[in-house]
Image (cartoon, rainbow, N blue to C red):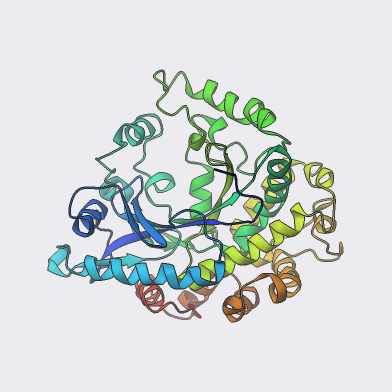
Amino acid sequence: MSRLRLFEAIGVEIEYMIVDRASLDVVPACDRLLASVAGAPVSDLERGAIGWSNELVLHVLELKTNGPARDLGRLADDFHREVLAANEVLAGLDAEGGTGAMLLPGGVHPWMEPIRDTRLWPHECNEVYRAFDRIFGCSGHGWSNLQSTHVNLPFRDDDEFGRLHAAIRVVLPLIPALAAASPFLDNAVQPVLDARLEAYRNNALLVPEVAGLVVPEPVGSEQEYRELVLEPLYRALEPHDPDGVLRHEWANARGAIARFERCAIEIRLIDCQECPSADLSVVSLLVAVVRALTEERWAPVSALNAIPTEPLAALLGEAGRVGHGARVEIDGLQSALGLPGSVTSAGRVWQLLADRMAPDHVPARYGATLERLVALGPLAARMTRAHRGGASIRDIARDLSSCLAEDRPFLG
C-alpha cells in the first residue's frame, strides 16, 4: 500500500473523562462502556468514521478517526455524534447513586485525587501499563489525569519527514497559548493555565530522556532521529525495563513524536477542548500553519532547525503559564512565521496567523469558533475569568459537560 503524502490525510484523537452524571466525579467505566457496545470485552471499537478505544486509566475514553481522514470539515460532526452515542450508553451504566455516567471535556479533571481514583486499564496490553506504573508511578496527575487531543500528520519519505518535523517543533511552544484548557487542579486555581502540560513535563523525571525538553531536538532524517532521540531513550530505560516492554517509539513523550511504524508525526500538546468544534478549530489552524512552514512559505527548513531547542522549551513553559500573554522573543521565530519582530505576544501571533490562514486554509464551518478563540484566549483563560466572576469550579465543569453534549463554545 502506498504511503500518504504530506497533508493528504490527518488522524485526530480526542480523550474524554468518564464521570458521574450527578457528582461529576471520575468513574472507572471505560471497559464496561466498550463491552456494552461491542457485546464482549474489547479495547477498540470501530464505528464508521470514528473509533472508540481505551487509554492508560479506566476513566478515560479515546475517540479517534478510524484511519486517516481527508476532510477536516466534517470531523467535528463525526466526533460529536460519537460523544452523544457514548453518553447514551453511559447514562445506563451504574455509577455513584445510580445516576449513570457521561463524558466530560477539558485537559484535566479539576478535583480528581489520583492516589484514590486511579484505576489502570486491567485488560489487553496491561503489561505496558504495569511497566509504566512500576517505573514512574501512574497514580499522579502526570499520568492518570491528562486528557488531550492528538494530531497525526503523515509523511512519505525522509525529505517529507525532515520538513514536517522542523515545522512542528517551532509551532509546538505556541500551542498552549491557543489550546490551554486546564487551569484547575486539586479543586483549586493553579498558577498556570495549562496544568496538564505542567504535569506532563514532569511525569518522567526519573528517566529524563523520556520527554527531553518536550520540544524535540532538530533532526533531518529517520536515522538521525533514531540516533539522537530513540536509542538514548531506550538505553536510559533499560536498567528499569530489562525485558524491553517499553522499547517502542511510543515510549517517547516529547510534545511531538515520530511514529515510523505508521509514517506519521503525532502532536500531543493540545488540551482537550470543550467541544469537538473547538478541538477541530484548533487542529485546523495548527495544521494550516504547519503546512505553510513545510512548504517554506516564510523561511527555509534550515532556518527552522537553526532555532535552538532551549528557548523554544522556555517559551512552551511560558505559554502554558500565561497563554496569550507569553512573550515571543526568540531570534528567528517571528521571521520563520512570516511575522515582523515587533509581534511579541503569543496571542497576537495566533491572531495574525488566523487572519492569514483561516480564509483559505481552515474549513469555513470552524471560522466563527476560531475567531472567538483567538479573540478571547484559550479555554483556560475563559474558565479562569468565569471563576473570578463568581462561578465555582464545579459550576464550570457542569457547563463544560453541556458544551460537549451540545457542541457549543464555552464563553465564560
Viewer-closest of 208 and 274: 274
Viewer-closest of 402 and 153: 153
Q: Position of residue 84 (x, y in %)?
A: 32, 72
Residue at position x 48%, y 35% in the image: 251
Horizontal side of residue 40 vs 325, given as left or right: left
Q: Position of residue 228 (x, y in %)?
A: 66, 28
Horizontal side of residue 147 vs 360, given as left or right: left
Residue at position x 41%, y 33% in the image: 136
Horizontal side of residue 393 vs 338, given as left or right: left
- The outermost residue toward the front is 1
The answer to which quarter of the image holds residue 101 is bottom left
Horizontal side of residue 67 vs 282, given as left or right: left
Residue at position x 37%, y 71% in the image: 81
Viewer-closest of 216 and 78: 78
Residue at position x 47%, y 53% in the image: 67
Q: How many marks?
A: 0
Viewer-closest of 253 and 89: 89
